[in-house]
Image (cartoon, helix red, strand yellow):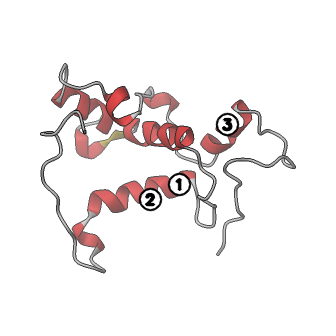
Amino acid sequence: LFPYPTLFRSSYYCDPSSPFQKGVCENTHSHIRRILPKGTSFDDLDQEFCDLMFSHINSMVRKKLNNHSAYDMFSSLYAGDLDIKEMLNISRIDPKDVELNPSLKRNYLAAHGFSSPSAPTPCDEAEPQD
């Protein structure tokens, strides 16, 4: 069972073809696409990379949050009640170290021994399509 049953209580369903009803989702999608441009295969992405990617996205400072990150805002709201690393498997990244571009994936692959362009990787990059 989910260890925090009262945390996520309500759901909102958007109407089809109404992106204006889901601004936060669309904004997060645009951040994902900055790291994984259109045409990039998601087939072989592993959970560790996805956790890293969302750690970076949620550690980005945002004007809408008074120059705080989503991670910091969530932490301050639930300080002491939750272990974010345990619950969501994301970590805080220092804002000056946040990478929201394809180099995040390249650096991850290099750190995990996939630096050779001819070697198969868990997240092969496809050429962007126009």
Please determine whether, in this image, residue 106 is positioned above or below residue 76. Answer: below
Kind of residue at badge 2: Ser
Q: Is residue 69 visible?
A: no
Residue tagged 1? 34
Q: Residue furthest top?
A: 80
Q: Residue at x 19, y 22 (%)?
A: 79
Q: Dot 1: within a 10 Å radius of its alpha carbon, few (fewer than 14), some, or many (20 or more) residues?
A: some
Q: Which mark is residue 30?
A: 2
Residue tagged 3? 107
Kind of residue at badge 3: Asn
- Asked whether the residues under the numbered discs 2 and 1 touch, taking CB atoms below 8 Å apart as contact, a structural biologist would say yes
The image shows residue 26 at horizontal and vertical percentages of: 35, 62
Q: Secondary structure at mark 2?
A: helix
Q: Residue at x 58, y 45 (%)?
A: 46
The image shows residue 112 at horizontal and vertical percentages of: 70, 33
Distance CA(mark 2)–CA(mark 1): 6 Å
Q: 62 or 38: nearer the eye? A: 38
Q: Dot 2: within a 10 Å radius of its alpha carbon, few (fewer than 14), some, or many (20 or more) residues?
A: few
Of tags 3 and 1, the one toward the viewer is: 3
Kind of residue at badge 1: Arg
